[in-house]
Image (tube, rainbow, N blue to C red):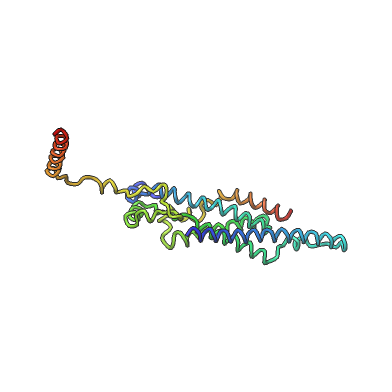
Amino acid sequence: MPTERELQINPIVPESVAHNTKTLTTLRNLTASLFGVGAGILGLESYPGFLFYVVFSLLTSALVYALRVRGAETKTYFRGSMELWTGGLLEGLSGFVLTWTLFYGLVRA
Amino acid sequence: MTWISQSVTGLGLLFLAHACYSAHEHSVLHSTSAASVSSIASQGIDTSTIASLPLDISIETVAAVFTVCLGLVLGTPGLRPIQWRVWAGKIEREGEKGFMNGDGTLDKDYIGNPFKVLESRPGFVDIRKQRKEFAEWVREGDSAATIPKN
């Protein structure tokens, strides 16, 4: 975390932080439901399903990094690189499990 | 930009729906055939072979998920620099063009140049010119007021 002195020297724009966080959260929620659909169709159970979610979430982060950050430093858009790579991973988990179980039941009914 | 993301997402959803339908049909077909086989031969059937999906459906599902994901990422609005100096510099250089949505409208929370106050403040005021303009305005007002009376 930056100290107060560093924030005085290099101020941060709260509107931009909110905009970036909102963009990433929306994307995470949408894609989590989508990965649930995929995992349900594939019929994954137990740990492979969660592994599927983690792998595809990291893939989404990689796509954001490639298409939106575009080689610039992650610090330009986020307060830390963890915010891009692992932020919102747990928030999307509930949506993932929801659609995962739904589509697992639908396909194998 | 936005039509690319929408078409990619739509294509991915189409593939996903097809994969879902294929998986469903496969499970239905397999369960009925397995049931008939078990009723005829009553042999032990390996349950793992029933549960496993054909490789092409698996590949289609993964590809469809990736395609939809790509479309969604392409559809996200551009990120904004959070450091004040980078952000203000971007506004100075690009103006409103850097803060457009995908469909070409300006973002709602675009606040414009943060240094607008500095640029529009009065610098040195030419008080003599202003007095001259005021005097002319008064004279015009006088003549305009007096002419209709004549």
Residue B41's place in the image compared with B123, above or below, is below
* Corner quadrant of residue B142: top left
Residue B139's place in the image compared with B46, above or below, is above
Q: Can residue A62 be seen in this snapshot? A: no
**Nearest the eye: B82 or A47:** B82
* Corner quadrant of residue B35: bottom right
Name the residue located 50 percent from the left edge and 56 percent from the top edge: B75
Name the residue located 14 percent from the left edge and 45 percent from the top edge: B126
Q: Can residue B87 be seen in this snapshot? A: yes
**Nearest the eye: B9 or A70:** B9
Q: Tell which residue pokes out farthest to the top in this image.
A: B149
Q: Position of residue B14 (x, y in %)?
A: 62, 60
**Nearest the eye: B132 or A51:** B132
Name the residue located 59 percent from the left edge and 50 percent from the top edge: A93
**Nearest the eye: B105 or B38:** B105
Q: Tell which residue pokes out farthest to the bottom in this image.
A: B56
Q: Position of residue A68 (x, y in %)?
A: 45, 59
Q: Tell which residue pokes out farthest to the front in this image.
A: B150
Horizontally, residue A25 falls left or right of residue B97, namely right
Q: Give the total number of marks visible in the rendering.
A: 0
Q: Position of residue B84 (x, y in %)?
A: 35, 51
- Where does the C terminus of chain B fall, quadrant-wise? top left
Q: Position of residue B45 (x, y in %)?
A: 81, 62
Residue B144's place in the image compared with B99, above or below, is above
